[in-house]
Amino acid sequence: MRNTLALSAGALGALGDGAGNVLTGSESKFGSVGYRIYSPDGGLLAAQGFPPEGGGLSIPLASGFAGIASLAFGDNPTLLRVLADGGVTVLPNSGIAVADPRGGLVLFGDGVLTAYDDELNPRWAASLTLPSQQQVHGLTVEVTGNVLVLLGMNARVFDLGGLWVDAAGHPGMAFLIAPGVVIDEDSFSLAPDVRGGLFLRHRACRGSAPCSSEWQGRYPALSTTLEAAPGWLSSRPLAALVPLEGKTAYAVAGLPVPDCAFEVVTADGVSCGFADFSAALATSPIVPANLMANAGSGSPCRAVLNIGRDGTVLSLRSRDTGLPCTSDSECPVSYDWFPGYFR
């Protein structure tokens, strides 16, 4: 089954929670953010508005969504949980929040790293003592719940460090990941290994030369030693890895996978085939605020795809992804989703 929602608005990417509900977002020309939550079959469940720059729901829960956002103009952003029916729970915590593959999230703020379950009940909290002049640049949770915190400095050139916190909240010692990182030229990201641990990718942009990406290796869970990246991943420097339910395989996007498709790849890099949505997404239903079922083929597919927590495939098409604008202020947006596709 495919559901399509077409409307005119500035679009934010869609999210899918563990129950198959879909969160869509639109941003007005004044910067305010409006969210809507739909059931798997397309019924509208709830709507919630946030003030300018107040939107930040980015983490799917078992039911509902979470993120750092503000409810009223002038309020400081804080941790929010938005239920599928639109109810909101506000927690007095703020900072950097990322999803936990086991469910829930991990948040760093005011020197404390806190893990929450899907109901936003704390699992544990750990005070982090950082090396002198270093600050948290990011964090990623691997599939067994261990957290790798990235450390850097507010400087043009700095050494990128790491610090593991185990799944029970016990911090380890800081270690060096990459020396001589240059702001605006070097960026590092982490991706999950479904067997445990994290893959490290480096993106370099030097002068007028095209940017390049490389998988530099793999950190086993809680290890400070970088292993070589597997060959199947090294040959895909632009790959985006989404662990599938059961955590035995990935849905892989990015070259050489075609647009509007995922390749299903096992933990050992064996391809199980492609899930290609290009034909279904080639149509352009532009009927404002109308939900419909639609499928077909036509123009080449240009869409931003995502996978919800329950395996629902989500698509966003807008002016930037192939739909023409009727005016400067009225640009059609098409959200499409395929409920439970990878379940």
Image: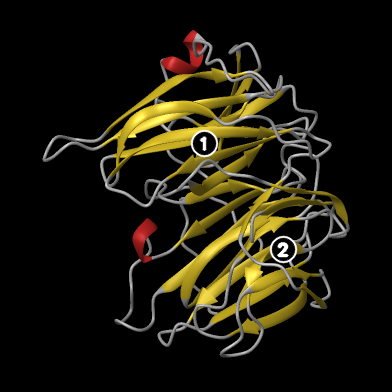
Which residue is painted at 70% across and 61% down in the image?
A: 22
Query: Which numbered marker is on residue 241?
Result: none
Which residue is painted at 48% across and 33% down in the image?
A: 161
Residue 62, percent across and down?
Answer: 83, 53
Secondary structure at numbered mark 2: strand
The image quadrant of residue 235 is top left
Which residue is painted at 74% across and 66% down in the image?
A: 42
Give the left or right position of residue 205, taking residue 61 as reference. left
Q: Does 264 appear above or below 333?
A: above
Q: Does 133 appear above or below 95?
A: above
Using the image as rendered, state which of residue 19 and residue 54 is in the foreground. 54
Residue 279, percent across and down?
Answer: 50, 43
Residue identified by numbered label 2:
66
Residue 36, percent across and down?
Answer: 67, 74
Instruction: Tell me the CA gap for discs 2 and 1.
Output: 27 Å
Question: Which amino acid, by three-letter code, is at mark 1?
Answer: Ala
- Can residue 42 be seen at all in this image of the molecule? yes
The image quadrant of residue 81 is bottom right
Using the image as rendered, state which of residue 313 and residue 135 is in the foreground. 135
Comparing labels 2 and 1, the label whose residue is closer to the camera: 2
Question: Which amino acid, by three-letter code, is at mark 2?
Answer: Ala
Secondary structure at numbered mark 1: strand
Quarter holding the C terminus is top right
- Can residue 241 be seen at all in this image of the molecule? no
Q: Does 92 appear above or below 226?
A: below
Give the left or right position of residue 109, taking residue 301 as reference. right
Furthest residue to the left?
Answer: 208
Using the image as rendered, state which of residue 207 and residue 279 is in the foreground. 207
Furthest residue to the bottom?
Answer: 73
Query: Which numbered marker is on residue 261?
Result: 1
Give the left or right position of residue 305, taking residue 186 as reference. right
